[in-house]
Image (cartoon, rainbow, N blue to C red):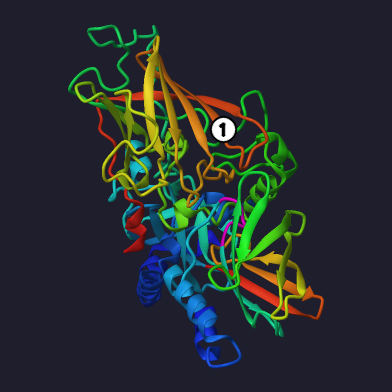
Amino acid sequence: MVLQLIKERLHGAMPKAAGTAIAALALAAGVSAVAQEGHPIKGSWLGTWESNDVHGEFVLLVMDWDGEKISGIINPGTDNIEITRATLNPDGWVVQIEATDEDAEGGPVHYQIEGRIQNLELPDRSIVGTWKHERGSGAFEVSRQ
Amino acid sequence: MNPTQATPRFRMASIRIVRPLHIAAAAALAISGAAHAHHPISAKFDDTRPIELEGVVSAVDWRNPHVHVFLNVADSDGQVVNWAIELESPVVLERSGWRRDTVRPGDRVKVDGIRARNETRQVWADALVYADSGREVLAARDLPPKAPRTARPTPRWPDGTPMLGAPDTQGGYWSYPTRTALVEDGVRVEMNKDGLLANLEDAAKVAPMQPWALGLYMHRQRRFLQDDPLYLNCKPPGGVRHMQSSLGVQLVEDRERQRIFVLMGSGNQNYRIIYLDGREQKGQVGGDDDNPLYYGRSIGHWEGDTLVVDTADFNEDFWFTNGGLPHTEQLRLIERFSRPDFDTLLYEVEIQDPGAYTRPWKSSWELRWVGGQELASYFCQDNRS
């Protein structure tokens, strides 16, 4: 579903190289999610952060859990935005992610993402919520690949 | 339901009337596989909703993972409907002395069971009862072999090392685990054989879980373990799970090659290998590099009469125990196998997983020797055809 969305919108505003990279990653990951019965946040998550005119509408997160903290990268291979802080609260399965990057002019862009894990029991579970930075905000939705 | 409505004449009529329904039901099952899907009993059936039925057997489906007896039952309006009665696996029923033709179409039986959670006409039952004689049939009387009055001595190899497998050519395996879901030693919580807690408030007592692991464990418990990938996708019974299965394990010692094969009655008759040749924990076998693994990598050594096995490199694609306790790739198991007498295998395991638990913890149980038999043939994929 997400892959189809990407294909349909690749001709849009997204930088071609980034779109191709994300599509390739999505293809590599396969259509159905790989089983992951451990920490719910671990894995690759693909989807959209709508109305993001700094980094485009599509987003890929790769996150890991080392037993103490969540780490990860946003848009690896293209933007390489390191996640500086991420938490998962099992009371409601609330995910909070913070990351920092620069815009095209070199200005700071501090991302704050907050959402809830939906369909926790499924390999292709989702995080649905909102994102914001200094100059924008919008809906955020990614699905585990 | 009014049992008195079922006269012999009506019985014949019932079979005629319901045959199209039966064919339709069989077609639906063949398409969806839903009624044959493998599952913990408590995931599909609600033990707070008892139901009694009486009717005429229209068909018996004797295959893994569960036997189904289809029953034509007259409702209060006299209309006959078909119910699916789900029973134990063919393996368990055959060990209890029953055969695929013990109950036949046309037999009139009573059922005292529990209803499906999804309101379909499906019932779980531990047995059927012949309506005319009151005799119980297809009851799962799968009890462990009687222990001898005097414990038989531990069989040993010529060098004195305990034998973990069969001491003769007649074979045998270990089954009837006294614990079928992980709980930390010393903790008393009530749960069924699938590991479903009687009281969800006990969840935090089961093991020293990190908050996320406790949350995920409770989520799985609230959903009655219906998401268990062992049942949904025939994922292997890795971790300690094959040691919790009533289908048993066989320990085959290859002393020349210094390894022990753990053959599993569950999990599509998978096996794992315990290496005793002193190799290191990682990268020890060519072609074994699909890291990480469902069964991890196991190396072992003897400490007196106890085999100590260190297993690591597990993946996260399965549940490592009945009941839904989570684990991560950091899982490491220190297993201790000992045979205090001929018929008893003591299994002790320390769970080390700093990704999911706040400290190492231990659990232990016993298995009973089933002599003179090989592992029963059981394939999870039978329900995928």
Task: Return the residue nearer the eye: B10 or A20.
Answer: A20
Identify the secondary structure beneath mark 1.
Answer: strand
Task: Return the residue nearer the eye: A40 or B319.
Answer: A40
Question: Where is residue B14 drawn, in percent x and y?
Answer: 40, 70
Q: Which residues are magenta?
A: A38-43
Question: Where is residue B233 drawn, in percent x and y?
Answer: 43, 58
Q: How many residues crowd mark 1 within 10 Å: few (<14), some (14–19), many (20+)?
A: many
Residue lying at the far front in this picture: please name it.
A106
Query: What residue sits 25% from the left and 30% below the top?
Result: B373
Task: Return the residue nearer the eye: B280 or B335.
Answer: B280
Reply above or below: B59 against A47.
Answer: above
Residue lying at the far right in this picture: please name it.
A134
Disc 1 target residue:
B352
Question: Where is residue A55 drawn, in percent x and y?
Answer: 66, 79
Question: Where is residue A104 drawn, in percent x and y?
Answer: 69, 80
Query: What residue sits 62% from the left and 72% below the top?
Result: A142
Amino acid on which disc 1 is placed: Gln
Reply above or below: B104 against B197.
Answer: below
Dominant SS type (magenta): loop
Answer left or right for A117 relative to B12. right
Q: Chain of mark 1?
A: B
Q: Is residue B155 visible?
A: yes
Q: Quadrant of the C terminus of chain B?
A: bottom left
Reply above or below: B345 against A1.
Answer: above
